[in-house]
Image (spheres, rainbow, N blue to C red):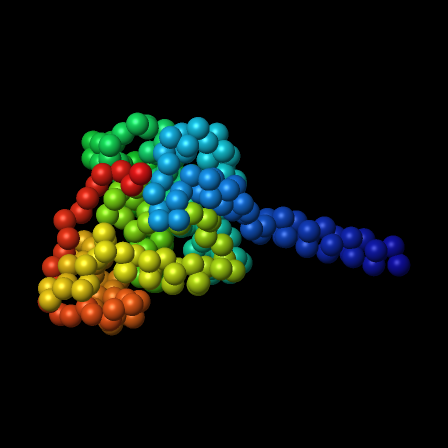
Amino acid sequence: MRNQYLIMITVLLFSLNSIAQNKLPTHSDWNSITKKNVSVSGKVNYKGMKASLSKIEGYLKILKENAPKKEWPKNEKLAYWINLYNASTVYLIASNYPISSITKLEGGKPWDKNFVESGDKIYSLNQIENEIIRPRFKDPRIHAALNCAAVSCPSLLNEAYVGNKLEDQLTQQTKVWINDPSKNLLNQNVVKISKIFDWYAADFKAVGGVVAFINKYSTKNSASKKIRFLEYNWALNE
């Protein structure tokens, strides 16, 4: 009988330890930070973000200490990486604010700077996007979710991405991005669209191509094969 109790206690402790190891991080801090400092249209109050640097650092520490585990649901993993990318980008800007453009940092290559921590690893923004998010999740809607702090970037969502809402959030942000006339001009004979569609053409080819992707989310359904790419505006999205 005693041995049975010992076995039961051991199993219970193992289960509790497994739960603790696989605990999903809360994104509530990032949710409150963005609610306070990002407008519905995606404009960022970097002065407010600078005042909230300690809170952003606290959130990034939570993400560092709760890196994705293989047991996590796919949407939880993707939400984690999107939030880590966006929060790290905001942190980079807020730490150096006032500044006119993200391209003024790190010799014009801030995306190659290794400063983003997750578990025991340190990544650059480029690594998170191009070595983790794009190849692992293969969902071109992520281009509407990742924000590079520039006017021509898709707008920053004023809430955290979370696993149980991720599908709706990605679809909604994609619709917002596609139908924003400051990002894509669809009601012309020659459609003028974001340079993102050029830079990441392979991602959209995998889902039928750029035109098919735009038509799927456009309210006008006016995208044609005559496409031009808009010049990218790297001014700060404030």
Q: Is residue 23 left or right of residue 61?
A: right
Q: Which residue is depicted at the point 19% across and 63% down?
A: 186
Quadrant assignment for the N terminus: bottom right
| Residue 221: image location, x then y, percent | 24, 71
Q: Is residue 218 left or right of residue 25?
A: left
Q: Which residue is depicted at the point 49% across and 33% down?
A: 55
Q: Does residue 29 appear anywhere in the picture?
A: yes
Residue 122 image-quadrant placement: top left
Front-most of 56 and 72? 56
Q: Which residue is depicted at the point 26% across and 42% down?
A: 150
| Residue 95: image location, x then y, percent | 36, 29
Q: Is residue 188 above or below residue 149?
A: below
Q: Is residue 102 above or below residue 71?
A: above
| Residue 177: image location, x then y, percent | 30, 57
Q: Which residue is depicted at the point 19% across and 59% down?
A: 185
Front-most of 128 and 39? 39
The image shows a total of numbered marks equal to 0
Q: Is residue 181 above or below residue 111?
A: below
Residue that sits furthest to the right in the current view: 1
Q: Does residue 121 appear anywhere in the picture?
A: no
Q: Is residue 144 left or right of residue 118?
A: left
| Residue 127: image location, x then y, percent | 32, 46
Quadrant assignment for the C terminus: top left
Residue 107 image-quadrant placement: top left
